[in-house]
Image (cartoon, rainbow, N blue to C red):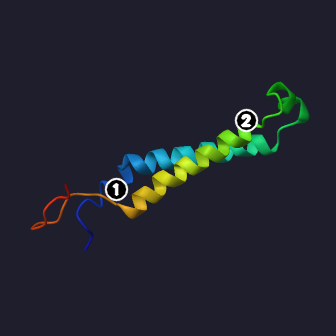
Amino acid sequence: MREPGHRARPFDIRLVLGGLFTVYGVLVTAAGIAASDEDLAKAQGVNINLWTGLGLLALGGVFLLWLRWRPGGPPRSGERPED
C-alpha cells in the first residue's frame, strides 16, 4: 500500500525547483565550457557561464537532496507533527 501523501509528492516545490535549477545548470555549464576566447575577453577573463552553471547545479542538487532526506507529507494517524 502506498504511504499517505504519495500522490502529492510529484508536485512538491522542492522537486520542481531542483529539477529546473539542475536543467538550467547543465545548459549554462555547457555554454561555459564551450566559451570562446572572445567571450572570456568580454567578461574580463572570468568564465561567468561556467561559474553560474556550477552554482545552479549545486543549488538544484541541494533541493533534490533536501527532498530525499525529508520527504514530507501529512503525518500518519496517531503521530504528532514535528515542531
> Residue 63: percent from the left, percent from the top?
46, 51
Q: Which is more foreground, mark 2 or mark 1?
A: 2
C-alpha gap between disc 2 and disc 1: 34 Å
What quarter of the picture does the N terminus occupy? Answer: bottom left
> Residue 25: percent from the left, percent from the top?
63, 45
Return the residue at label 1. 9
Label 1 near label 2: C-beta < 8 Å?
no
Query: Which disc number belongs to residue 19?
Result: none
Q: Is residue 43 above or below residue 4?
A: above
Three-letter amino acid code of the residue under disc 1:
Arg
The local secondary structure at tag 2 comes to helix
Spot the residue most to the top: 42
Three-letter amino acid code of the residue under disc 2:
Ile
Q: Is residue 27 left or right of residue 18?
A: right
User: Looking at the image, which residue is at 47% across and 59% down?
Assistant: 65
The first of marks 2 and 1 along the sequence is: 1
Mark 2 Cα-neighbour bin, 10 Å: few <14, some 14–19, many ≥20: some
Return the residue at label 2. 48
Q: Is residue 33 left or right of residue 38?
A: left
The local secondary structure at tag 1 comes to helix
Q: Is residue 24 above or below residue 67?
A: above
